[in-house]
Image: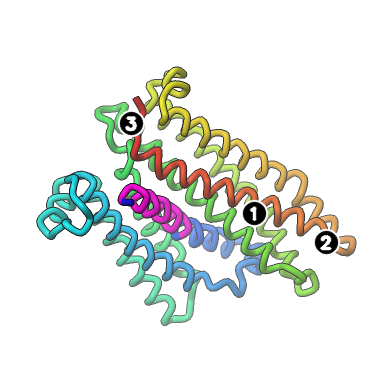
Amino acid sequence: MLDLSAYAVRFLEYLVLMVLFGVPLLGWYGSRRAALTDALAGWPLMGVLLVSATVGLVLTGAEVVFKTAGIMGMPVADVDRGSLGWYLLETSAGRAAMARGALLLALMFVLGWHRRRGKVEPAFPLAVALAGGALASLAWNGHAAAGEGVAGAVRLAAGLVHLLAAGGWIAAVLMFLGMLLRGKGAAGNGRLRSTHDFLRGFSTLGTIFVAALIVSGIAHYGDLTAWSLSTLVQSTYGNLLLFKLALFGGMLGLGAMHRWTLVPRLERALAGGDPSQEVRALRQSVAAEAALAILILIVVSVLGTLSPA
């Protein structure tokens, strides 16, 4: 039960913090481009961020308890103040958790202050920085921060880039799915047009995310597996990593289909008449991409607990 609960907490922490980082990043990106602003209009972005920050803080606390119990070999119910203090102060993962909690509290303060002022856009840059720091701190929950010397520094840098790029991409996929679901039957009020504009305008940022994921993934996982094909084939870690790569390949294929086929079809349909068929196809494809993203996060939640050897 402890293992399943700990894995669930890890998965939810990855998901929530990636959304918390990616949503303001896309909001900031969109608010700086007039063609994309309409797609964000009416979205409860501040509410999404406040809820995500609160949930992230709760998950951080739960993770600290589970990790302490796991390291010390005791039931969760037996974890006391002394054990928690040791984990938080004497381990790198514990210190990262404290930093994450502080960043999330600061983010909640910033969001609350801007919400009282009734303005969302000015909060985006600082929210991206604080949420990015919170997401990056998850690198100390896995293997990224376990290296030494120059190779260890490269591995850590690659792990940080990988986390941030994945956060931006996964949040974008979930936001696009929400936009397409919200746009059901809404071709007449312009929502589908603004959603199309956002999908099209995201292509440059999406390319940056994909390139960063590929380069950082090669550096990070190549170092972890000592660039050994036998490790990939003969170990549980390697098999899961290959499964993750297959899922990532599926996301790449769907993303390419969106950019080069489905989004252009939607544009032509919006200009010529009834876009319902194109919208349905794009919605189903983005939903499949979101499902693959969730599966990748589940795999990552397990990979961080396994030895690459």
Q: Which residue is mark 1?
A: 287
Q: Which residue is mark 3?
A: 307
Q: Which residues are magenta?
A: 2-19
- Between the C-alphas of marks 1 and 3, the distance is 32 Å
Viewer-proximal residue among 92 and 12? 12
**Residue furthest front in the image:** 1
SS at mark 1? helix
What number is the disc on residue 4? none
- Mark 2 Cα shell of 10 Å, populated few (<14), some (14-19), many (≥20): some
Q: Earlier in the sequence, mark 1 or mark 3?
A: 1
Q: Quadrant of residue 27?
A: bottom right
What number is the disc on residue 275? 2
**Three-letter amino acid code at disc 3?**
Ser
Find out whether the residues at labels 2 and 3 contact each other: C-beta distance under 8 Å. Answer: no
- Between the C-alphas of marks 2 and 3, the distance is 49 Å
Q: Percent from the top left, x then y, of residue 130?
A: 36, 59
SS at mark 3? loop
| Residue 14 magenta-highlighted | yes
At a point 51% along the width and 30% down the height, the residue shown is: 242
Find out whether the residues at labels 1 and 3 contact each other: C-beta distance under 8 Å. Answer: no
**Residue furthest right in the image:** 272
SS at mark 2? loop
